[in-house]
Amino acid sequence: MSTPAARVLVADDDRAVRTALHVNLSKAGYDVTLVSSGEQALESLRGSAYDVLLTDVMMPGMGGMALLTEVRTHWPDVRVVVMTGFGSVRDAVSAMKAGAADYIIKPIERDELLLLLERALQTRAMQRELQQLRKEVEQRYGFSEMIGISPAMREVYEEVTAVADSSALVLIQGETGTGKELIAHAIHYRSRRASAPLVAVNCGALPENLLETELFGHERGAFTGAVRQHQGKFEQADGGTLFLDEIGEMPAAVQVRLLRVLEGGIVTRVGGEHTVKVDVRVIAATNRDLWKEVQTGGFRADLYYRLNVFAIRLPRLADRKDDIPLLVEHFAKKFAVRHTRPVPTVSAGAMKALQGHSWPGNVRELEHFMERLVLLSNGGEITSVRLPESPHAPAHPGAGSALPGLGAVGPGGLPVALEDFERALIAEALREAGGVQARAARRLGISRSNLNYRIGRLGLTLQDIRFGVEGRQSR
């Protein structure tokens, strides 16, 4: 069965131009419809489906730019190619910014037009294929927030499906930015505990004493400042799921208490004698190699074996580059909605560049990069990208300095230097406050919730707070 011819709608008020286009495009195998105004083009679009709209900029009544806006709003799947006179290149640039797929300058060369239409149709076909593949993945696995069709991701979906509706402990392993928290959410919301709480704790964001009371709770008077009884995260998650993020950062003393709870399902609050029975499923995540941590004494072997009942390892983005077009499409739509911008398209060349990048920050890095592209593109086609530089270790200040100075501005430039400064400043405030976040927040002049957010965003760990950010490389 032969493939139906691509349908092209031509809008131009010049009869001679319309006739020439009809002859050339029909000979090339296209199904061509001719109209003489923007209003007639809209009528045709309402009544029939088209693959490409080829429109002149200057027409009586509704011009090409107004028509482009209508098509982008109501028929976003139709690729729009703008025709303009030699002296109106500025109109063509404006059309590209408004979302046109391409433009061509009159007088039109036949071969150039055919090449341009072929490119527009290839891009449209790729977008449709990606949409269909994503739809199939969502229908099969039901993971609306997890994007990917590569063999590595299909294996992850199958593992999640297999373990979700059980009570087994799960250990999610993967580099920073690979989506460990999304997997934890998928497991919880596909389980029988979906209607119960999902409670998350970042084990690397709190000093030992605060993490202990955060997990297990404390009784009134257990320590200075404990003016009332506090239920820990285990009690808060009773009947549901507790997600322990960055489990590899957990101090040894807390590891011991955690093991007891996992083995007996019983919590004893700090400073208390009575036990509380809890029914909690634990999902842990780490970007570290826990087995190596066990061998070097940084993590308890018995806790490792207890947690490693069902391990899921997430692939790096560099190992699933076939998923990048899907991720790009997803993030482009997400940030266009968030920032009230038109959804940009990405040319084949730009997509090839995105797929060729190493993305050391994985999906999270690509997500942040796409937000920037959406803001810069203004809804047009993204034809080239300036890829992020490879990360470099920042220079460290001299002895006795807790904060990076001007000499610390390395290859990453000002954004990296400012982030290093913020990380060191917060770590210093927490050390001086004895790890008490409320006290550190007051010193910094921000709210405790704001401080909590910054700790998570900057990836501050217990070791950073103890030894200082400058001590990272010495550990």
Image: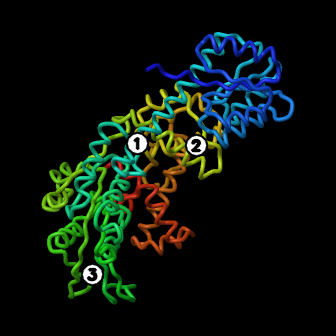
Q: Residue at x 42, y 51 (%)?
A: 144
Local packing at callout 1 (Cα closer than 10 Å; few below 14, some 14-19, many 20+) is: some
Q: Position of residue 265 (x, y in %)?
A: 19, 75
Q: Position of residue 172 (x, y in %)?
A: 27, 53
Location of residue 137 by image quarter: top left
Q: Residue at x 38, y 58 (%)?
A: 464
SS label for mark 1:
helix
Residue 319 against residue 312 in the figure, above or below: above
Identity of the amino acid at label 2? Arg
Location of residue 26 by image quarter: top right
Q: Residue at x 25, y 71 (%)?
A: 280
1 or 3: mark nearer the eye: 1
Mark 1 / mark 3, whichever is N-terminal: 3
Could you tell me which quadrant the N terminus lies in?
Answer: top left
The residue labelled by disc 1 is 362
Identity of the amino acid at label 3? Val
Mark 2 / mark 1, whichever is N-terminal: 1
The residue labelled by disc 3 is 270
Q: Is residue 88 left or right of residue 331?
A: right
SS label for mark 3:
loop
The image's mark for residue 238 is none
SS label for mark 2:
helix
Distance of mark 1 from mark 3, alpha carbons? 39 Å
Q: Nearer the viewer, residue 17 or 423?
A: 17
Distance of mark 2 from mark 3, alpha carbons? 46 Å
Local packing at callout 2 (Cα closer than 10 Å; few below 14, some 14-19, many 20+) is: few
Distance of mark 2 from mark 1, alpha carbons? 16 Å
Residue 239 against residue 285 in the figure, above or below: below
Q: Is residue 145 left or right of residue 24?
A: left
